[in-house]
Amino acid sequence: MNKQINKVKLAITTKCNLNCDYCFVKKTNQDMDFATAKNAIDLLLESERKDKLLSVYGGEPLLNFKLIEKICPYAITRAEDLRKNLIISVCTNGTLLEKKHLDFFEKYDIRLIISLVGEKSDHDEFRSFKKQSGSYEKILEKLPMVFKKIPPEHLGVSFCLFPSTIERMEENFDHLMKLGFNYINFEIIHHYQDWTKEAQEKFHLGLNKIIKFVIDNIPKEDFIFLNPINWEIKYQKISQSLGLECPFWYKLEIYPLGEMAFSPFLLNAPNREKHLIGNVNQGLSQKFKECQYSPKDVRCKKCQFSYFPSENTDKGAERIYELYRTICLKAAKEIKNQALENKLYTRYIKKIKEEVCF
């Protein structure tokens, strides 16, 4: 294995019980089998570096829960054998959660991420069941059970952001914290609504206010954790992404039938075949089989700038991501500087590195 792979996103099914208009995953009812998942796990764990993240998603991954029950014990045992530090996370819409799922996640120390938009009106507009009824109330009734079983440092929310909800960004963020979440990842929605300059400006203002709130609360011992601040503090992920980086490090996606790519948005793209880099059951395509990252290699530079085609790029959303990374990088630096004089900031950083970064 001549690759360094830090993270793999495993799409274990295309099935879903929701019918969200903006979703890029077609409901083709494909389930990943254990042999494919095992090959993906081996690919991740046998590659270079010790720290590994296995991110399980779908579709709705709980619709293939039997596979989760198989792959988690296998991955944990394999990681122990190879002396790798493995974190497993599962991202769900939250509506199907039952005690058996939470007991399993608790037993195997699995991190759980639930997708939400914010307050009921915004959430139900975008995340609905097939009969167009919103999913907010169903998630709300599950949350007491979730918070009872899953430690707060192992529980996160994927905060879905749309141009039409960006004006209420702070209110929705506040609502998620009031629900009980203190680990929040911003999920910027691509290829659905237009991220206009006005929406970008509102995002910029809103994120700055949220990050100021997060930093100001650290001396009060009220810790709120945001990605990618966590990833920058623990892995210098933003710093790396500003220069040349190998997409194998953090962008590897594996689809239900084993196809590999560097983006989930290519799962159903009309020209998807040209962007597949191989199949985990057969191996990498010839182009990627022998390559090994080097910042000075011309092939690496061409790879980064040629892989993602312009027709598949949402330029407005990319601008939002650029703002997101820039602001969070600045915040991570400020937190590190404050830690030189204030022990509470040191505790905050320690908690990120040891418990909450996933």
Image (spheres, helix red, strand yellow):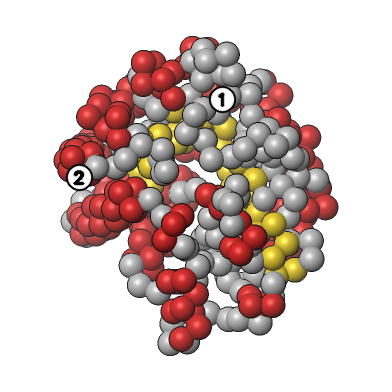
Q: Which mark is residue 112?
A: none
User: Looking at the image, can residue 117 be seen?
Assistant: yes
Q: Which quadrant would the N terminus be assigned to in this image?
A: bottom right
**Disc nearer the start of the sequence (1/2):** 1
**Secondary element at image label 2:** helix
Residue under circle 1? 19
Vertical side of 329 occupied by 201: above or below: above
Q: Camera-side residue: 256 or 183?
A: 256
Relative horizontal placement of residue 286, taking residue 52 as reference (left or right) = right
Q: Give whichever of 238, 17 is nearer the camera.
A: 17
Q: Residue at x 64, y 60 (%)?
A: 273
Query: Total marks drawn?
Result: 2
Percent across and percent down for residue 350 are 39, 52
Residue visible at 79% across and 61% down? Answer: 281
Give the vertical position of 41 relative to 92 (above or below): below
Measured from the top left, where is residue 310 in percent x and y? 41, 61
What's the residue at 69%, 72% (across, down)?
285
**Pointer 2 residue:** 197
Q: Amino acid at mark 1?
A: Asn
Q: Mark 1 and mark 2: span between their CA atoms?
A: 29 Å
